[in-house]
Amino acid sequence: MINVIGGIYRERCLHPSWDHVFGSGGRAAIAIATMGTKVNLHAYISDNLLYDFNFKVALLEKDFFSLTRLPYYKDIIFNYSHGLDPLNPPIVEKKENIKLTSDNVLVFGMLECDFEINVDYAVYDPQNTFSTESFSKNGSKANHLALVLNENEAKTLCGCSDVNNIEEIIDVLHIQEAAEVIIVKCGPSGAIVSYEDKKTRIPAFKTNSVWKIGSGDCFTAHFANNWIENKELPDVAAYKASLATAFFCESSTLPSEFMLSDYNPKPIIFEGFSHKPVAYIASPFFTLPQLWLVEQIRFNLLEMGLDVISPYHDIGMLQSEDSKAFNKVCDADLTAIQRSDIVFGIIDGCDSGTIFEIGYATALKKKIILLNENVPLNDLVMFHNKHTVITNDYVTAIYKTLWANL
């Protein structure tokens, strides 16, 4: 059996529409139970959220899930505009620490409390990029400890301003945190698994669509189940966790063992760019909603490691309406498209300038990712070619822009 300590929260996303009660603890516990391992979840939860969460639990085999509930006075809600929205956590009241002595524990960082545990095997996912806290902060101990971190969490936890190489940071954390296993998730290049003086690269996988909310919870849960319960080697456990996460990203469904039995997505082979790919944003930017979307695209593509040319940010608006001004902006836009490796286009609204930019990029045989949420497909016949991918999901469009350059 695995004990899970973590939050149960309501998660709301504007687009795609999503309103469910999971949270890191709730999702991980359900993920592990779905794989046929007994789980006891320890969590603070309000009456309202408990009512909704019980509908999720009712779908599980009865003997595989139990809940040690600590009452909380209000609902904790996370709100997202989309799946890559920067986290803006709610302000909550801290409650008494969750304390546990046991054999096996998967523990997440939480808003509403800390933890104090003494266990044999522990997997710890801090879930906090900006103020990542040590597993042992409150005196917690584990005979066998695995840390699951993203790159920023690893750097923050290390606290060594003079150490920048991720493998050197991992070496520091093994000693500093007394961790037997350290996993650092590195976005498109998969993850690094470090144990017994060796480091293994685990791939991420390409999917037809990408659902991001909760994907990290899924990875940590499956790693914990594979390493603790199934006694897999850490790199094998992490590889299987990456596969399960790809299934979740593609379907927004937590997989069972049967679902994963013949799941075989294409691994992403990525060891860094020989040069940073340049992405050009072809989009109208004349209203506040249009500008907001351009800002989001630019932020997320930069975050993925691409160079970005945004006409609004890098070329500017028309300063006058004489022919020289028009020519200057047009020439700058076309030159930028020529320089780019890929064009990220927003076809909604059928803006004439954007359509011209996409047509020009098509003539140059540039790779194009086209985000289309409301234009009828029969109006997009001329956009269908081997260089263009059309999708109606924002997060998927961002990831396909990255994958097209690998």
Image: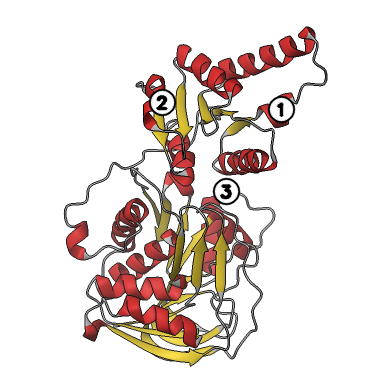
The kind of residue on which mark 2 rests is Leu
- Residue 380: give its label: 2
Left or right: 113 in relation to 237? right
Query: Is disc 1 surrounded by few (<14), some (14 to 19) or many (20+) residues within 10 Å?
Result: few
- Residue 314: give its label: 1
The kind of residue on which mark 1 rests is Asp
Sequence order check, earlier mark of 2 and 1: 1
The kind of residue on which mark 3 rests is Asn
- Give the CA separation, mark 3 to mark 2: 46 Å
Mark 3 sits on what residue? Answer: 165
Q: Quadrant of the C terminus?
A: top left
| Secondary structure found at label 3 | loop
Sequence order check, earlier mark of 3 and 1: 3
- Residue 395: give its label: none
The colouring scheme, among rainbow, by chain, secondary structure or one colour, is: secondary structure
Left or right: 347 in relation to 326? left
| Residue 197 appears in the figure | no
